[in-house]
Amino acid sequence: MAKQLLGPFAEMVTMDHLPEKGPLLDERLEIIRDGGVIIEGDRILDVLDEERFKQVKALAEMKGSPLGHTPIRRKMVLLPGLIDCHTHICYAGSRAKEYSKRISGESYLQISERGGGIMSTVRSTRQATEEELASTLAERAFEHLLRGVTTCEVKSGYGLDLETEIKMLRAIRRVDGSIDPMPRLVPTCLAAHVRPPEFRTDQQYLDFLVSKLLPPVKREGLANRVDIYVDRGAFAPELADGYLFQAKNMGFTPVVHADQFVVGGAAVAARVGAISADHLERSTEREFKWLRDKGVVAVALPGSSLGLGDPFAPARHMLDAGLCVAIASDWNPGTAPMGGLLTQASLLSANQRLTAAETFAGLTIRAARALGLEDRGAIMTDHLADLIGFNCDSYEEILYRQGALSPSLIIKGGKRIMRAPGPTGG
């Protein structure tokens, strides 16, 4: 297998040697200047400081050397590929008209009560074919890749029936398995998004999911994660407890949409031992303690706050309370249509006074923890060669530009990204 030397970089921000949770000062960042990496296949074989890079470069330039060298000809800062640990980018239709109503003064809950909101997307997604869902998902995922996102979680939850939820999860698998280049997609079953009108009670619908949907999802290997939306207008905490404990007993990893409009979901996440609690805009010190004590990752979703005009999740308080805080886009057709993860994280960091170290950790190594992934999120030996480079000479420039500085170098699984995605395949 061919080996490739890449560098030298003005700076490599490795995200290595960082604590898993709590506050981070920028001084904790490992910055390697004028060094490089050796890639073999889809993995990082070695991370080199300036002196070792010069030695290896000299060997690579010798006649007959099995090591190739790709020189970086302008100042560039190298980071691990970004990890978006919460998205809803598998769907059909648009809710642009609803957005216009919201910015005119109507609330999200008012629109939902009239049959809009999630149910609007459900109707469109039920009508779409698996091929159509895979095609539009591939377009959004590739757009994410060009913005530096090399791993992307994707939820179902716009089907709310057996056929469409399975269809969505199969579309996610199709895109993840057959299109290159593409971010690695991590599927999550969010069939417990809201109760569809076909069911009389929330409990009846959750019983249906446990008995009819989750078994084939597990059998086909369509998802290992199960999410539920706990909030006003969605599911009550006491019902979510039972549902997630049953899913956990079936071998699924629990995730919770928590405390977006009212508190209650974070308590569920703590009780069931969820891997993450996402949103948390209404959470308080009490909820933070519960999550910290149970080792639940807190995922801030600035995209939905921007889309709704609501306050950001209190990420500063979360970190100071000792939580592991990840940052994700919540890219969805209703409340977070932007999808620009780096822009959202930059705005969150300015609003919440997050350090660059805390922000980048939330987009990489701590986001990987929210997905239970141990082979990415840092520039380290044996990690995936998922890397992004920015044309600047200091990492501080990246957040300073608030998302306007896009990566000019993207390497996914050891391959440099230079082309459009292929057909959706079979």
Image: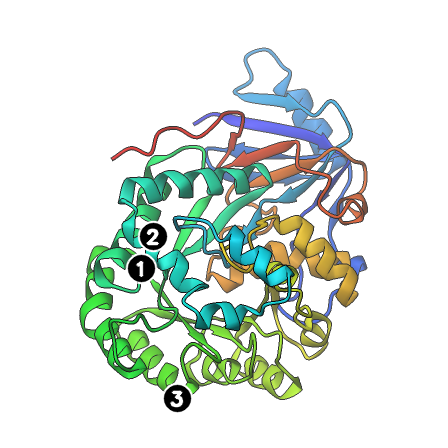
Instruction: Say which mark, if any, is on residue 197.
Output: none
Q: Secondary structure at mark 3?
A: helix
Quarter of the image for residue 202 reads bottom left
- Total marks shown come to 3
Q: Secondary structure at mark 2?
A: helix
Residue annotated with mark 2: 125
- Whole-percent x and y of residue 398? 75, 45
Kindly identify the residue that appears in the image at 39 percent across and 28 percent down: 422
User: Compared to 271, does 210 lie above or below?
Assistant: above
User: Compared to 360, does 5 lie above or below?
Assistant: above
- Whole-percent x and y of residue 60? 62, 20
Question: Circle 3: is it few (<14), some (14-19), or many (20+) Cα within 10 Å?
Answer: few
Kindly identify the residue that appears in the image at 41 percent across and 43 percent down: 137
Residue annotated with mark 1: 159
Q: Amino acid at mark 3?
A: Glu
Kindly identify the residue that appears in the image at 68 percent across and 68 percent down: 312
Q: Amino acid at mark 2?
A: Thr
In this rendering, the label closer to the viewer, 3 or 2: 2
